[in-house]
Image (tube, rainbow, N blue to C red):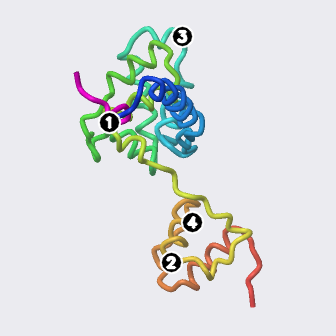
Amino acid sequence: LPVDPLFTNTSYKDRQMQLPLLLVLALLGLVTAKPKAVDEHECEVCKAVISAIDATLSDADRKDVVTIEERMQKYCDTAKGKEKTMCYYMGVGDKEMGTAGGVKREISGSLGRGINSKRLCTRLKSKDAQMCELRFDKKVDVKNVDLKKLRVKELRKICDDEGIDTKSLVEKDEYIKKIRQHYKLPDEL
């Protein structure tokens, strides 16, 4: 039998006293252990895309995985930005982008069985971690932020999100002026 170093050179009575102490310490360790912090942004794009696709499905659609995959394709054809990237990861691409292989059949089968987006994305995370690493960009509140403190890249992103034409813009001040015009904000002196 292997010898436990905690119980070597001790009498029977000493070992009986040590056992409850060890149990109390073990239980105390379990009680004080903090649960893993839940990141509210984890899998946010995955959840949003799958929820949007799920919302378009009727009970009759859920009976056929091919129909579900057609709905997935229809959604992904109109998707932009991070949603489009998520479609690429899922394996529902287009002629321009193609696909990353993906898990299209698994998603369509799960949606057919009525599995919700949170549970499905958690399951997909084990197969392809990059699906859950995809996050939405932070939105900038244009009316309450000092545009002069933003980088040109951030100003360009605001313009792209709002559909503001940026082809003739070069300088930071030009971007700021266009954004102010679009939102009908007063020019600062």
Binning the other alpha carbons within 10 Å of mark 4 as few (below 14), some (14 to 19) or many (20 upward) gives: some
Q: Quadrant of the C terminus?
A: bottom right
Residue 16 in view, yes or no: yes
Whether residue 7 appears in magenta in the rendering, the answer is yes
Q: Nearer the viewer, mark 4 or mark 1?
A: 1
| Residue drawn at 61 percent across, 80 percent down | 149
**What residue does disc 3 label?**
59
Please, what is the three-letter code of the amino acid marked with disc 1? Pro
Q: Quadrant of the N terminus?
A: top left
Please, what is the three-letter code of the amino acid marked with disc 2? Val
Q: Secondary structure at mark 4?
A: helix
Magenta range: 1-8
Please, what is the three-letter code of the amino acid marked with disc 3? Asp
Please, what is the three-letter code of the amino acid marked with disc 4? Ile
1 or 3: tag closer to the N-terminus: 1
Task: Tell whether label 2 touches label 1 (CB within 8 Å).
Answer: no
Q: Is residue 163 left or right of residue 68?
A: right
Q: CA distance from mark 3 to mark 4?
A: 39 Å
**What residue does disc 2 label?**
152
Q: Nearer the viewer, mark 1 or mark 2?
A: 1
Q: CA distance from mark 4 to mark 1?
A: 65 Å
Q: CA distance from mark 1 to mark 2?
A: 65 Å
Residue 67 placed where, x, y %?
Answer: 40, 17
**What residue does disc 1 label?**
5
